[in-house]
Amino acid sequence: MIIDALDLDQGVSVLHIVPSARAPHQAIEAAALMMSRQPTSQGLLIASHDGRASASSPGGNSAIGVAILLDHQGYARIEAARSWSEVSPASSNHQGVADPQWYSRVELESALDGSLQEFCRQVVAETGTNVDDIELFSLGNASPTACLKAGRALSLLRDQVYLESHTELLQAGTVTPLLRLIGLLEKGTEGGHLLLTTVGDGVSAVAIIMEAPFPGPRLAQQLEASSLSGAPTRSSRPSSAARSSSDFNALQYWRDSKAILRRTSGECAQCHKRSYPPSTLCVRCGSEEIIHKRSGDAGTVYTFTQDHIEDGTYDDTGTARCVIDLEDGTRMFTSVVNDGVAYVGAKVRLVLRKASRNTSETPYVWKSEILSSSESPTIQEQEKHSRER
């Protein structure tokens, strides 16, 4: 479970929750408890759960991007909310999509293409929203074409369909549903009815009523400043386009290949801090006296995460990304090559593998191989440890 809090001026607190798919209840309840301890502050909570507006009983599904405004003096209130499974359960309309809760944007738009009008009508009906009262409508992360098609299905005018997004914040790594909601709220007027559906890792529909002008530009600017200044944003999830836009630089790789392949790290002559790749300045004491040494190939996992974006596409299985501590004290970031279960403290060995990139070049990088051990915790033990955290 990851809970990030960003304190802004004028008593506004923004929380973003990324709960484990196994334990969404604990994440929502923890966030609600955190907000209740600051009764005078206004709070905006973005949570990954099934779409119900009640934080006390969020249900068991895990569709992403549902917005809950927790405050008696908030800018807006949730009028109704529905998840994909409630609005449009698995049927022939999904055109063979195996799991209606998890699939990519392209797959989802393809699945909705034949029944988009019916889907939008069901969203309006199930959320209790009157079409004539809708001021703004947004189809989450969907393409502009899909958004306009959905708007036409609801007989909405072009200026009632929200298409804009903060692309500069997407590149900075801020979460897409949060930006989409901020943009939608800042366009809304007091008393206006907003209808938001999210497309991505699942679908949810939320009907929102504006109660006060929302300080969107100021909030967006502060989020951008926080992202660019290096403030802790563990929940940041860059879009696939932003993560795959960095082209492979063959010249840079040719220049650095010897240091990469030899696992050359730098050791500060003053405080003996190790760094990989070697830097020209010690990050601990500021000394410019750096000695180049070769690091070993054995270490342990310091922390890890499961990444589902590979080469700009969504992968259901995902790849474990680890920060490992080598035996000589060098810390480096690697990907896991085998199907071994990554966990904190796991013993790893560095192996040379091709980097997974869409390029005609063939760069090689060091990746981690989880070593099998009788001391490795079982999946059940890991799940128990995750719940306790």
Image: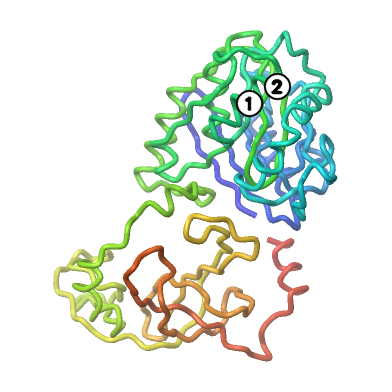
For mark 1, what is the residue? 149
> What crowding class fits label 2: few (fewer than 14 Cα within 10 Å), some (14-19), or many (20 or more)?
some
Q: Are marks 2 and 1 in contact (CB under 8 Å)?
A: yes
The residue under the point 58% across, 74% down is 344
The residue under the point 62% across, 89% down is 372
Direction from residue 16 to residue 312 in the image, left or right? left
The residue under the point 59% across, 15% down is 160
Image: 224 above or below 312: above
- Image coords of residue 168 (percent x, y): 38, 36
> What crowding class fits label 1: few (fewer than 14 Cα within 10 Å), some (14-19), or many (20 or more)?
some
- Image coords of residue 61 (percent x, y): 79, 48
- Image coords of residue 210 (percent x, y): 64, 15
Name the quadrant of the C terminus: bottom right
Image: 188 above or below 65: above
- Image coords of residue 86 (percent x, y): 84, 37
Is residue 41 visible from the viewing direction of this image?
no
Direction from residue 365 to residue 281 in the image, left or right? left
For mark 2, what is the residue? 153
Which residue occupies the foreground of this view, 275 or 196?
196
Name the quadrant of the N terminus: bottom right
Element at label 1: helix
Single out the residue that lies furthest toward the left: 289
The residue under the point 70% across, 80% down is 377
Direction from residue 153 to residue 140 in the image, left or right? left
Which residue occupies the foreground of this view, 34 or 45?
45
Give the Cα separation between the discs numbered 2 and 1.
Answer: 6 Å
Element at label 2: helix
Image: 32 above or below 249: above
Instruction: Name which residue type carries label 2.
Output: Ala
Instruction: Name which residue type carries label 1.
Output: Lys
Disc number for residue 374: none
Which residue occupies the foreground of this view, 45 or 273?
45
